[in-house]
Amino acid sequence: IDHRDVYRRLANSMESPHFDTSTDERKRLRYPLTYLIVGIAFVYTAHFVMVTDLIMQAHLVPLVCQLTVLADCFVNIIKDCKEGIT
């Protein structure tokens, strides 16, 4: 496909009434309303992600602490066994 054909097709499609924002079919209130709705959706999504992350951390921190204590116990067991052998 030649680049000129692509540009020609794009130029022809831009002459379509669907790309004209000044038509009477489109209401001026739709654009700010749409932007507002999308902005609110982004805010709620960010809030949901942060809250979910905090909940996961609240559940995982005690598990990590338990694993740390368990790892210390195993280290001490190995030390005690070495001292008992020698």
Image (cartoon, rainbow, N blue to C red):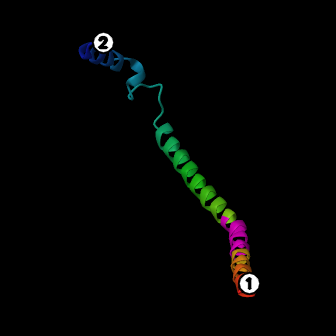
In the image, residue 23 above or below residue 80: above
For the C terminus, the quadrant is: bottom right
Query: What residue is shown at x 69% (from left), y 69% (from top)?
Result: 58
Q: Local crowd at mark 2 within 10 Å, few (<14), some, or many (≥20)? A: few
Q: Amino acid at mark 1?
A: Ile
Q: Amino acid at mark 2?
A: Ile
**Closest to the observer: 30 or 39?**
39
Q: Is residue 49 left or right of residue 84?
A: left
**Closest to the observer: 41 or 20?**
41
Label 1: which secondary element: helix
On the image, numbered disc 2 is attached to which residue? 1
Say if the magenta span includes residue 48. no
**Residues in magenta, as a range:** 57-68
Label 2: which secondary element: loop
Q: Which mark is residue 85?
A: 1
Quadrant housing residue 11: top left
Q: Is residue 11 left or right of residue 16?
A: left
In the image, residue 70 above or below residue 80: above
Mark nearer the N terminus (1 vs 2): 2
| Image position, residue 79 (x, y; %) | 69, 83
Query: What residue is shown at x 63% (from left), y 56% (from top)?
Result: 48
